[in-house]
C-alpha cells in the first residue's frame, strides 16, 4: 500500500506534468518574437539578479563536501560574475539562432491541385534529467523554449539552490513576454522516486533526455514510457592510418585526449596501422606522457613503450574519463573499422590519413553519430558544428543522432491545403 508521502510525491509529479502539457499547448501559439524577447529578458534578469544567484551558489558550494564531489566537480559547480555573464550571453546567442518552428521541410502540389507541406513543429514536453552544472539549467530552458517546447528540469541535488535561483529569475519574466509561466519548471524535490513517476507520465511528457553518468542514463532508458534521447558512453577512437602525417596525428590525439578528459567526446582509444607503429606510437605516447597519460596497449605497444601496461578487452571497451588511453595496432583500415564498430560506443570516431580513399571508406563504414577526418573528436559538439547550442549528444538512430540542437527538439506535421478537394 502506498504511503501518504508516496501519494503526495506522485500527485506532485502528475500536477507538474499536467502544467507542462498545458504550457506546451500555449507555446505552440507563441510567436518567434515572443520567444526571442523572453530569452533576451531572461538574460538580463540573470544579470540583474546575479547576487541572488551567487548567494544560492554559495549554499551549494558549502554543501559540496557532503556529496563527495571532486575538486573538478566543485569547480564546475562554482559560479562567479564572469560565469553568470557567460550564461546570460548564451541565452542571447540562442535568441539569435534561426527559429526552426514553422519551417517548411518539403512542399509539393499534387496533380489534383492539393498543396501538401511538411512543416516543423515542437515535440511538446521535454523531461530533462541532468548533472550538477548550474549553466545547464539555463541552457536547457533556452533551447527548449526557443524550439517551442515546455521543459521539466530535474537537476542534480548538488546544484539545487543555484538552479532554483536561475529558474525563478528566468520564469519571472515569462508572462510579460507572453510565454506561459509553467513552460519552464524545476522539480522541487530531490527524492529519486520522482524520476520514476515522471518517466511513467507518457500521456503528458513527449520525450525524456538524460544527461549524466551511465547509471542514470540506463535507468531512464529502462523505465521511460516515452521516447528517450541518449548516449550511454563515449568510447571515442582516433585511427592513425598508414598514410597519416604523424605530426598532425600527434596534435589531434593529444587534443582529443587531453584538452578535457572528463567529457563524452574525448578520445579513449588509439588505433595505429602496423606499418607505421614503430614510429607513430613512440612519438604520440611521448606527447601524451607530458600530460601524464597512462598507456594500456597490445603487445606491440608494450614493446615500444616501456611504461605501457598490457590492455584487456575491457580496456578497449572503456570510457576512462581520465588520464588513461588504450592503444592497439591493426593490420588494415578494415580491421580498424571492425574494432571501432565492435568496441566503440558509436559516439565519435576519427581517422588521420592523407588518402581520400581511406577517408571515404572510414566515413561510410564506421557506425557512429559523428565521424571526423583529420580532426579531433572534441569537435562533436553543438556549438562547434554550428548548431549554436545543444541539449546533449545522441547515439540513437531514430529521430535524433549526434549533437541535439533546436531542430532535434522538433518533429513535423503534414499540412494539406485544398479548394474543396474530395477523394
Image: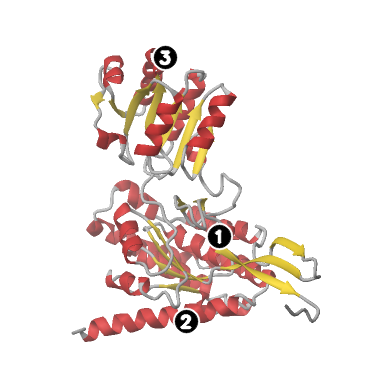
**Residue 374 shows in the view:** no
Q: Residue 62 carries which label?
A: none
Q: How many labels does the image show?
A: 3
Q: Quadrant of residue 133?
A: bottom left
Q: Quadrant of residue 160?
A: bottom left
Q: Name the residue under label 1.
A: 88
Please name which of the two marks, 2 or 1, marks the residue nearer to the observer.
2
Q: Which of marks 2 and 3 is nearer the N terminus?
A: 2
Question: Could you classify mark 2 by the number of other residues whose Cα lies within 10 Å: few (under 14), some (14-19), or many (20 or more)?
Answer: many
| Residue 123 horizontal/vertical position (percent) | 54, 68
Seen as rendered, the residue at the extreme front is: 423
Q: Distance between the residues labelled 2 and 3?
A: 62 Å
Residue shown at 36%/20% (left/top)?
A: 286
Which residue is pictured at 46% across the width and 58% down the height?
135
Q: Mark 3 points at which residue?
A: 275
Mark 2 secondary-structure assignment: helix
Does residue 360 appear left or right of residue 225 in this picture?
A: right
| Depth check, front residue: 205 or 128 | 205
Q: What element carries label 1?
A: helix
Task: Tell me the residue at 77%/66% (across/down).
Answer: 110
Amino acid at each position: 500500500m502506498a504511503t501518504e508521502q508516496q501519494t503526495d510525491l506522485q500527485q506532485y509529479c502528475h500536477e507538474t506534468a499536467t502544467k507542462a502539457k498545458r504550457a506546451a499547448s500555449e507555446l505552440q501559439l507563441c510567436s518567434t518574437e515572443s520567444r526571442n524577447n523572453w530569452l533576451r529578458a531572461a538574460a538580463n534578469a540573470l544579470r540583474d539578479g546575479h547576487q541572488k544567484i551567487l548567494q544560492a551558489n554559495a549554499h551549494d558550494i558549502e554543501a559540496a563536501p557532503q556529496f563527495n564531489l571532486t575538486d573538478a566537480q566543485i569547480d564546475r559547480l562554482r559560479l562567479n560574475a564572469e560565469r553568470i555573464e557567460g550564461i546570460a550571453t548564451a541565452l542571447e546567442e540562442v535568441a539569435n539562432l534561426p527559429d526552426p518552428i514553422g519551417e517548411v521541410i518539403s512542399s509539393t502540389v499534387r496533380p489534383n491541385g492539393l498543396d501538401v507541406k511538411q512543416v516543423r513543429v515542437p515535440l511538446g514536453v521535454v523531461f530533462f534529467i541532468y548533472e550538477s552544472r548550474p549553466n545547464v539549467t539555463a541552457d536547457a530552458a533556452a533551447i527548449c523554449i526557443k524550439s517551442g517546447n515546455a521543459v521539466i528540469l530535474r537537476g542534480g541535488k548538488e546544484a539545487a539552490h543555484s538552479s532554483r535561483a536561475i529558474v525563478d529569475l528566468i520564469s519571472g519574466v515569462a508572462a510579460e513576454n507572453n510565454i506561459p509561466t509553467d513552460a519552464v519548471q524545476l522539480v522541487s524535490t530531490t527524492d529519486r522516486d520522482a524520476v520514476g513517476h515522471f518517466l511513467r507520465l507518457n500521456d503528458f511528457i513527449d520525450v525524456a533526455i538524460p544527461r549524466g553518468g551511465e547509471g542514470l542514463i540506463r535507468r531512464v532508458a529502462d523505465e521511460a514510457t516515452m521516447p528517450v534521447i541518449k548516449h550511454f558512453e563515449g568510447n571515442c577512437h582516433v585511427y592513425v592510418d598508414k598514410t597519416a602525417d604523424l605530426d598532425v596525428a600527434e596534435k589531434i590525439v593529444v587534443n582529443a585526449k587531453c584538452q578535457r578528459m572528463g567529457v563524452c567526446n574525448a578520445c579513449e582509444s588509439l588505433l595505429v596501422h602496423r606499418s607505421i607503429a614503430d614510429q607513430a606510437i613512440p612519438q604520440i605516447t611521448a606527447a601524451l606522457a607530458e600530460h601524464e597519460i597512462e598507456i594500456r596497449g597490445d603487445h606491440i605497444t608494450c614493446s615500444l613503450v616501456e611504461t605501457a601496461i598490457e590492455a584487456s578487452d575491457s580496456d578497449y571497451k572503456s570510457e576512462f574519463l581520465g588520464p588513461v588511453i588504450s592503444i592497439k595496432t591493426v593490420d588494415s583500415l578494415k580491421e580498424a573499422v571492425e574494432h571501432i564498430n565492435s568496441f566503440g560506443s558509436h559516439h565519435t570516431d576519427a581517422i588521420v590519413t592523407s588518402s581520400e580513399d581511406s577517408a571515404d571508406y572510414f566515413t561510410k563504414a564506421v557506425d557512429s553519430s559523428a565521424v571526423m577526418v583529420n580532426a579531433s573528436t572534441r569537435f562533436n559538439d553543438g556549438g562547434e558544428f554550428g548548431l549554436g547550442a545543444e541539449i546533449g549528444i545522441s547515439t540513437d538512430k531514430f529521430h535524433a543522432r549526434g549533437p541535439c540542437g533546436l531542430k532535434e527538439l522538433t518533429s513535423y506535421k503534414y499540412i494539406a491545403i485544398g479548394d474543396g478537394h474530395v477523394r
